[in-house]
Amino acid sequence: MRNITLNPNTSAEFFIEFPNYPEADKRPTFYIKELDKVIISSQNCVFNSLGMLQVKLSKADTGKLGYYTGINAEEHRERLMFEVYSWENNKSKLIEAGSVTIAGFIQGAMISEVEILAGEDIGENLPVYLLNDKIYQAKNLLVDMGKIIGITKTTAIIDTKANIITKGLVSNVAWAWDYNKGLYLGEHGGFIQDVSDTMVYMQSLGAISSPNSIYLNIGIAIQQTQ
């Protein structure tokens, strides 16, 4: 699923790729919605010759997202979606949709941690699952999806207690995340941002806060639509 990240009260310009894009005269309209409630509606978008939709949002547009930046509004963040419609044969047609991350929502967020015995040596900041009261590194999406309880805070040593972050803001100077993509469990464990078409299942692990930080928020495993 496509994902865009926006900062409230900050003008934004971004591109959405369309391999087979409609004709420009079909008047695309960009929406951000919470369920069926329209938060932002903009016709300041146009298809270019590279097959991408260029969308521009003003500060007045993104200012409407300020309500969703608080930690207490997480449930709203998970329901925010964008949709793109074109106008064809006197009817509005949905041509693209995806999720929306509000960059400011992690401000002031608390980290939730637990201590659990490690069943093996595990590196820093890696997704783990619980088995027989011990944590193990996730290494296979099809086997481990839906079992993830958090990530290691530091390197874990076998048969010693490990600090596991179950939710919250996590930083690592070695990371270099892309704001415009989501965060998912990889086919062989770890984090990925690009979900391939060959992956039958996917599990969101949170959202990108900055190039070297994430907001860990483990979602449910879902099956991709082909």
Image: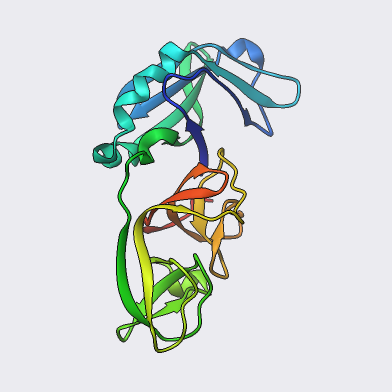
Residue furthest out toward the left:
72
Question: Percent from the top left, x then y, of residue 28?
Answer: 54, 16
Tell me the residue at 43%/56% (across/down).
205
Tell me the residue at 48%/73% (across/down).
138
Question: Percent from the top left, x then y, of residue 175?
Answer: 59, 53
- Count the marks: how many? 0
Q: Is residue 44 left or right of residue 81?
A: right
State the residue in front, 57 or 54: 57
How are the colours assigned in the image? rainbow
Does 193 appear above or below 91? below
State the residue in front, 183 or 174: 174
Question: Percent from the top left, x then y, of residue 73?
Answer: 26, 37
Is residue 136 among what the camera can see?
yes
Residue furthest out toward the bottom:
159
Tell me the residue at 65%/14% (across/down).
24
Does 142 appear above or below 69? below
Is residue 147 among what the camera can see?
no
